[in-house]
Amino acid sequence: MKCAISTASLALLLSGAATAFTVSQSPKTLLQLQRDQQLQHVSRLEPLFMGRAAAVRAATKGKTDAKKAKVNAYYGKKIIMAVKQGGSSDPVANRQLGDLIKAAKNNSVPMDNINRAIKRATEKDAGDFSESKFEAYGHGGASFVINVLSDNANRSTADVRSAVNKLKGKMAEQGSVLFMYDLKGKIEIPGEVDEEELLEAAIEAGVEDMELVEGDEEGTSIVYTDPKETAAMFEAVKKIGKDAGAKMSLSHVSKAPVECSEEDFEKNMAIIDALEELDDVDSVEHNMSN
């Protein structure tokens, strides 16, 4: 009787054995474990990278849109000024207006915007815009020339001072910064340019002063020239087929650029970004080489 097993005990043992065989699995190899870890790692990072890429694209598009809006607003205000000062909305009779319309078109300002600005200038409540410049110091020897076009001098002055002071910059006395810059004609080209070809076209256009440098973005170019020769220089750019998307303006260029530390550069760019967000500020020029 010692070897006898009850029916109930036998059933329990068989049930336990079946369960053991059901849940038991062969151990994974080291290679399989590594693959599982890599898949888990990728699954966690993929949304993160996709999110960052989308954020970068959105930020880039946002900056491009903001820059376009600035250009459109600038020429809108300049056209209103030209109509009011010239006393005519006819670009033939008002030479200043005609030149501005040409420059606006060269800078890809939509014709609808140009016509709206001309119409706005003839309305009684149109603002009286005036240009002014502010000078300031940043971090690490940086300096700024802040170009303003506003119909409210008190507002623009207060806004500019506030933006600079909040980020630990310092407003400068008139003339203390500007003498370190040269005023030049500037043409921004969204592509690379053959210098010899451009030089030949510039000479034919009557341009005597030309400097070709790399643009702020990779694969772009900037041409500097005498302010009086800017229009002729643009014609030279047009002749070599590089005028599509090109932009023409006047710019203050530092006589002695400075290289700031990475930390100071970031602080200075924060000041520039804050200033460029102001509606009355059209552009900010600086002396940083990096």
Image (cartoon, rainbow, N blue to C red):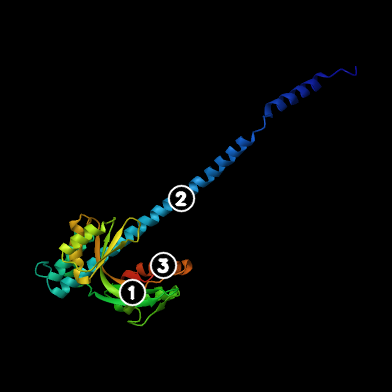
The quadrant of the picture occupied by the C terminus is bottom left
Query: What SS does tag 1 mark?
Result: loop
Above or below, 202 against 86 in this view is above
Q: Residue at x 79, y 20 (%)?
A: 10
Q: Give the CA distance from mark 3 to mark 2.
A: 25 Å
**Image x and y of residue 273, in percent:** 39, 66
**Image x and y of residue 14, in percent:** 75, 22
Amino acid type, callout 1? Lys
**Which residue does the numbered mark 2 point to in the structure image?**
51
Q: Give the CA distance from mark 3 to mark 1.
A: 20 Å
Q: Tell me if label 1 and label 2 are in contact, CB under 8 Å.
A: no
Residue 231: image quadrant is bottom left
Residue 74: image quadrant is bottom left
Amino acid type, callout 2? Gly
Q: Tell me if label 3 and label 2 are in contact, CB under 8 Å.
A: no
**Which residue does the numbered mark 3 point to in the structure image?**
269
Q: Residue at x 16, y 75 (%)?
A: 85
Whether residue 217 is visible to the viewer of this picture, yes or no, is yes
First of labels 3, 2 by sequence position: 2
First of labels 1, 2 by sequence position: 2
Mark 3 or 2, closer to the camera: 3
Number of other residues with Cα within 10 Å of mark 2, as a class: few under 14, some 14 to 19, many 20 or more: few
Give residue 255's mark.
1
Amino acid type, callout 3? Met
Number of other residues with Cα within 10 Å of mark 3, as a class: few under 14, some 14 to 19, many 20 or more: some
Q: Along the horizontal axis of the image, is 290 left or right of 281?
A: right
Whether residue 116 is visible to the viewer of this picture, yes or no, is no
In this view of the protein, which residue sits in the foreground, 253 or 25? 253
Query: What SS does tag 3 mark?
Result: helix
